Amino acid sequence: MTPTFKLTSTVLGTPDPRGLADFYRKILGWPVGSYEPEWVTLRPADGSAGLSFQLESEHAPPAWPAGRDEQQMQLHLDIEVDDLAAASEVVEAAGGVLAKYQPQDDVRVYLDPAGHPFCLWIRT
């Protein structure tokens, strides 16, 4: 019998799981699944894979873009939006910071409150 696999979450390490989950809740609108001091989950209503936030008290934010001998980014989130300017305002109001380096005109790279890079992008 072949086993089945289902991705249920992407986990982000952070020194503040509740704070980081609240940030992503504000921009994605997903409800909280669990809300513990060291573990928080957000789950979209359609049951697809969500985000989880795990306590990592020694979390070191990655550099963007990373240079030699800097903490490398292990992953990033791509979030499609329908209005890049309006979505950017929402992210900044929630506490996201626009990265200094922007590689494309139709993408905005932001850093979340724990320093994880993520991209807002618009389909062209």
Image (cartoon, helix red, strand yellow):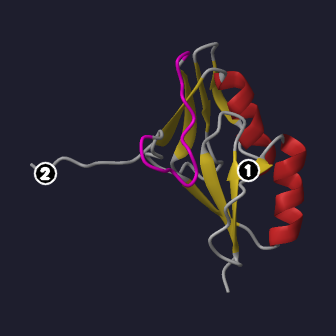
Farthest bottom residue in view = 124
Pick whichever, 22 or 119, lies toward us.
Answer: 119
What amino acid does circle 2 point to? Thr
Q: Which residue is mark 2?
A: 2
Q: Looking at numbered disc 1 in the image, what kind of residue is underneath it?
A: Leu
Assess whether mark 1 and mark 2 are in contact (beta carbons under 8 angstroms).
no
Q: Position of residue 60 (x, y in %)?
A: 54, 29
Q: From this viewpoint, which residue is outermost toward the front?
A: 68
Q: Is residue 76 above or below residue 40?
A: below
- How far is disc 2 from disc 1 in space, using C-alphas? 34 Å
Q: Quadrant of residue 87?
A: bottom right
The circle on residue 28 is 1
Q: Residues within 10 Å of mark 1 (few under 14, many from 20)?
A: few
Kind of element beneath mark 2 = loop
Q: Quadrant of residue 112?
A: top right
Q: Is residue 58 left or right of residue 45?
A: left
Disc 1, SS = helix
Which of the two discs, 2 and 1, labels the residue nearer the N terminus? 2
The residue positioned 54% from the left and 25% from the top of the image is: 59
- What residue range appears in magenta? 57-69
Q: Residue 84's spot in the image, x, y percent?
A: 80, 70
What type of secondary structure mainly makes up the magenta span? Answer: loop
- Nearer the observer: mark 2 or 1; the answer is 1
| 40 shown above or below 123 | above
